[in-house]
Image (cartoon, rainbow, N blue to C red):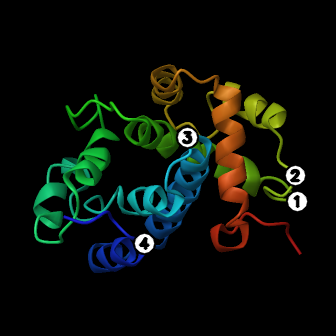
């Protein structure tokens, strides 16, 4: 079995996803995972690929998310640890696979947090280019802002990682900033 690559992750997403917002979410999570990998001294490209592929079954099976992931990936020569990481991001929601490694815990945490970072960036004329943790935290505390993004999951993830939320926010912003234009969160013209 081989470590997941971005080429393979992109091919598998294109084969299973058509909705533009899911491609954007895949890129946002991938970007955040790259920053988390750097923080932990891990393989950035590998973590980005896992982040990109994490919702591979969501469009086809929204009410059974992650129940079909293994089936979709079984013939794709993907490491069990990568499949397990993908399954763990739904822990306690639609999966009983507990995040144990730093990669799994990171994916569990940043999946929801990227939505809040994206929403906050979209509201700013300068986009994510100068978004600071302080202003992101203000938005985060407002439960009506990006209401579908679970603060509970983000906080559980930060606790699993044994990292303050501010540090995780900083990393997610840094990772997403690298792909601001593709994500549509760069400065407005």
Relative to the observer, which residue lies in front, 156 or 8? 8
The residue carrying mark 4 is 6
Q: Residue furthest front?
A: 41
Mark toward the viewer: 1 or 3: 3
Q: Which of the labelled discs sits on residue 49, or is there none? A: none
Q: Secondary structure at mark 4?
A: helix
Q: Residue at x 48, y 36 (%)?
A: 109
The residue carrying mark 2 is 130
Marks 4 and 2 sit apart, C-alpha to C-alpha, by 28 Å
Q: Residue at x 27, y 79 (%)?
A: 15
Q: Which of the labelled discs sits on residue 126, or is there none? A: 1
Q: Secondary structure at mark 2?
A: loop
Marks 4 and 1 sit apart, C-alpha to C-alpha, by 29 Å
Label 4 with label 2: CB-CB less than 8 Å: no
Label 2 with label 1: CB-CB less than 8 Å: yes
Where is the C terminus found, in terms of image quarters? Answer: bottom right
Classify 10 Å Cα crowding around label 4: few (below 14), some (14-19), many (20 and above): some
């Amino acid at each position: 079995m081989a470590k997941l690559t971005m080429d393979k992750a992109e091919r598998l997403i294109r084969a299973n996803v058509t909705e533009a917002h899911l491609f954007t979410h895949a890129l946002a999570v991938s970007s955040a995972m790259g920053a988390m990998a750097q923080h932990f001294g891990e393989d950035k490209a590998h973590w980005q690929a896992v982040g990109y592929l994490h919702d591979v079954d969501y469009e086809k099976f929204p009410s059974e998310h992650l129940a079909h992931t293994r089936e979709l990936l079984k013939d794709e020569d993907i490491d069990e640890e990568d499949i397990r990481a993908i399954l763990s991001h739904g822990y306690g929601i639609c999966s009983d696979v507990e995040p144990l490694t730093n990669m799994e815990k990171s994916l569990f945490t940043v999946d929801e947090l990227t939505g809040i970072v994206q929403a906050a960036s979209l509201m700013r004329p300068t986009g994510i280019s100068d978004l600071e943790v302080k202003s992101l935290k203000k938005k985060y505390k407002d439960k009506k802002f990006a209401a579908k993004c679970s603060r509970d999951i983000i906080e559980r993830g930060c606790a699993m990682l044994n990292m303050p939320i501010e540090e995780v926010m900083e990393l997610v912003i840094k990772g997403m900033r690298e792909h601001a234009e593709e994500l549509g969160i760069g400065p407005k013209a």
